Amino acid sequence: MNDIKKNLNMLGASLSLRAKRNEILASNIANAATPHFKARDIDFDTEIKKYQQDGPIKVTHDTHLSIKKPVAPGKVVYRKNVNPSLDGNTVELAVEQLQFAENSMRYQSTLSFLSGKINTLMSAIKGE
């Protein structure tokens, strides 16, 4: 039962992070013509690691060092542009649109996977 809960929590966290990233990328696209606007993003892989388990290794004594690396929660980073602009704007519209499309596709995939998991659980509960 705990495995199911962990799996559903991971998928929920993934959906939340993908939604947050879509908002940030949409803001970048909307501000493509704003002077001195800096393109922002979140590192999805770093953020999702907060919800993952590191494995069976545990710290058993105060003098042992933890293998976990600290993760800054919700850290938004600034994207570096390839082609500098004269007005200081770092948004590259093609890059932002590509990132937005990829993230949206991954959001839909995660949503479909979560829906399938829930439907399977409901079938098992009903005895179908």
Image: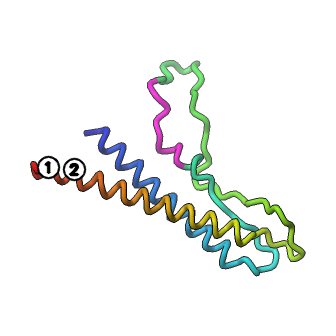
68 over 36 or under it: above or below: above
Horizontal side of residue 109 vs 123, given as left or right: right
Q: Is residue 28 magenta-colored?
A: no
Q: Residue at x 49, y 32 (%)?
A: 54
Locate residue 128, reporting x and y percent: 11, 51
Q: Quadrant of residue 101?
A: bottom right
* Residue bounds of the magenta highlight: 48-56
> Which residue is more in the foreground, 18 or 104?
104
Residue placed furthest toward the right: 86
Q: Residues within 10 Å of mark 2 (few under 14, many from 20)?
A: few
Q: Residue at x 62, y 57 (%)?
A: 42
Q: Position of residue 83 (x, y in %)?
A: 84, 66
Look at the picture and state if 62 lies above or below 70.
above
Q: Residue at position x 75%, y 69% from top?
A: 92
Q: Which residue is mark 1?
A: 125
Q: How many marks?
A: 2
Residue at 24% in and 56% down? 119
